[in-house]
Structure formats: structure tokens, C-alpha cells
Image: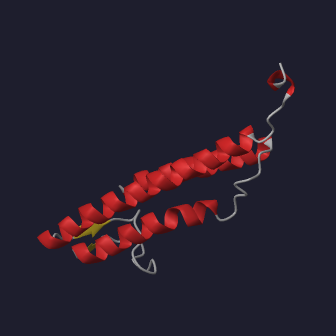
Amino acid sequence: QVLKGITLYHKDLRDRLDAIYHFRMQHEKLRGVVLEVLSGEKEEGAGVTMGAGKEKGDGNNAGAEESVTGEEYSAWALREVDEAPMALFASVDVLDLSPRGVAVFNSALEGYDRKVDAIE
């Protein structure tokens, strides 16, 4: 009877913290897989062609396709994976539980998924 009268206001915060924890664990797994796959490619010494949708280094490829070594591509892909969450979540207040904050957080998660899909 006593528990029925208690309102747990921290439940939404707990759910958000769980979502952040899950996101970070998934990102670390992805990073590990990308690192493992790219280190395997590095041993094979495969060359890769980067098209107009991919920017290497400082982005001076001007949309032209150019051949890059497996090592350069590996460095680019790993850097993209590392920077994806920072770029998307830098302006997000992850503790904002208002309806607008929830929408912004979900939008950042969707943007991260799109960016990772593009990297894969």
C-alpha cells in the first residue's frame, strides 16, 4: 500500500542512462570489429577506391575517385568510427528529458546509425 503512493520521477532518467550505456557498449563493439577487420585487410595489402561520397584526410579529393592504400583507408574508416558519436552528440544535452530533448536524442541516435551504415 505504501509503494502505491510513491511516484518514481527518476525512472525516465534511469531509462536514458541505460540507453546511453547500451549505445556506448554497442559503439565499442563496433569499433573493435572495425579495427579487427581493417587490421586483417592491412595484412592482405588490399587497395581501395574511394568515391565522391567519401572524404579522405582533409577532403581535397574534389569528388574524383582516387586509389588509396589499405592502410590509408583503414585509418580513415577508424577515424570516422571514432568521431561519429562526438560529432553527433556534441550539441545534445543527453540529460534533457523534455519532449524536445527526447526528440533531439533520438534524432542523434538515428544520425549515428546512418553515419555508421555509410562507413560500413
Residue 52 occupies quadrant: bottom left
Up the image or down, 105 lies above or below 87; here it is above
Work out whether residue 60 or residue 71 is closer to the camera in this orientation and state it: 71
Percent from the top left, x then y, of residue 62? 42, 75
Residue 36 occupies quadrant: bottom left
Work out whether residue 89 or residue 23 is closer to the camera in this orientation and state it: 23
The quarter of the picture where the N terminus appears is top right
At a point 26% along the width and 66% down the height, the residue shown is 38
Work out whether residue 20 or residue 40 is closer to the camera in this orientation and state it: 20
Q: Is residue 96 left or right of residue 22?
A: right
Specify whether residue 29 is in view.
Answer: yes
User: Looking at this rendering, what residue extends furthest in the top direction?
Assistant: 1
Specify whether residue 63 is in view.
Answer: no
Up the image or down, 68 lies above or below 110; here it is below
The quarter of the picture where the C terminus appears is bottom left
Percent from the top left, x then y, of residue 102? 72, 44
User: Looking at this rendering, what residue extends furthest in the left direction?
Assistant: 44
At a point 38% along the width and 56% down the height, the residue shown is 30
At a point 70% along the width and 58% down the height, the residue shown is 92
Q: By what rule are the colours in the image chosen?
A: secondary structure
Q: How many marks?
A: 0
Percent from the top left, x then y, of residue 74? 30, 71
User: Looking at this rendering, what residue extends furthest in the front direction?
Assistant: 2
